[in-house]
Image: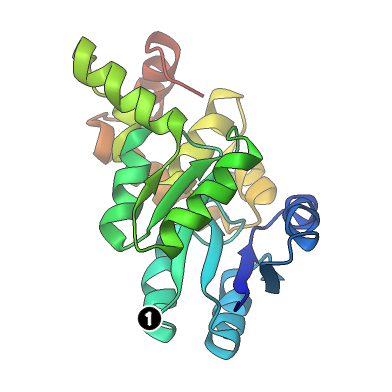
Amino acid sequence: MKKITILIVDDHKLIREMWRALFVADANIEIAGESGEMLEAIDLIKTKRPDIVLLDINLSNESGFDAVPLIRKYSPGTRIIAVSMHNQPAYAKKMMNLGVKGYITKNSPRVEMYLAIQEVMNGKIYLCAEIRELISDKSQGQEPSNPLTALSIREIDIIKLIKEGHSSKEIADKLYISQRTVEVHRHNILKKLGLKNTPALVSFIQETELNF
């Protein structure tokens, strides 16, 4: 029986090591490689052509959303399972629309990781129980939409740091990006949320129950 080859993409070394340790004892799975950076990961995927890529959508300098089209372009046969700390159904939907075959959160038990791999390898789509329950709760309760769903992962990171009182320079240092990039993100955040300026954003963060 051919082993399932898996390539791990996550910017946290500890997470990559944990996933590797999870699969190393499984005779049916082979780790094809791992990376913490998108471009390096794409090069590995081009060469290895793994059956599955486990993709963190919140990479340090890039977004997993940007990685998906490149993976599909350079290795069309590779199935992608997104793994994220974010449990908003909107993110799962966005990834699925890009062509991802599975979505699990980092709250998911390891049995769900195996189940996702099995389902995806059988040509099915897999959403973890946490996401399915949230979708079910919202459909029954008709809860108002979360304004954060309009924002990218990077923009959410920046909002969190603004909430903590960090300046644009401090945010740039923490996220390893330029101050100019932070300012562009801040402008886009205001535009997406329909706010006029930073004081309005701060007020919005303080007055709105946002799921940070």
Give the left or right position of residue 21, taking residue 112 as reference: right
User: Residue at left 22%, top 10%?
Assistant: 141
Q: Quadrant of residue 99?
A: bottom left
Q: Quadrant of residue 111?
A: top right
Q: Position of residue 20 (x, y in %)?
A: 76, 59
Q: Nearer the viewer, residue 170 or 113?
A: 113
Q: Quadrant of residue 140?
A: top left
The color scheme shown is rainbow
Task: Spot the residue most to the front.
Answer: 1
SS type, badge 1: loop
**Please, is residue 103 above or below residue 205 in the view?**
below
**Please, is residue 31 above or below residue 186 in the view?**
below
Q: Nearer the viewer, residue 87 or 179?
A: 87
**Please, is residue 102 above or below residue 48 in the view?**
above
Task: Spot the residue most to the bottom.
Answer: 47
Q: Nearer the viewer, residue 195 or 175?
A: 175
Q: Position of residue 63 (x, y in %)?
A: 48, 58
User: Residue at left 36%, top 82%?
Assistant: 73
The kind of residue tagged 1 is Pro
Q: Nearer the viewer, residue 146 or 90?
A: 90
- Label 1: few (<14), some or many (≥20) within 10 Å? few
**Please, is residue 108 above or below residue 54 in the view?**
above
Q: Is residue 173 visible?
A: yes
Give the left or right position of residue 106, taking residue 195 as reference: right
User: Residue at left 45%, top 12%?
Assistant: 206
Q: Position of residue 130 (x, y in %)?
A: 45, 29
User: Residue at left 60%, top 77%?
Assistant: 1
Q: Position of residue 158 (x, y in %)?
A: 51, 39
The residue carrying mark 1 is 76
Q: Is residue 151 visible?
A: no
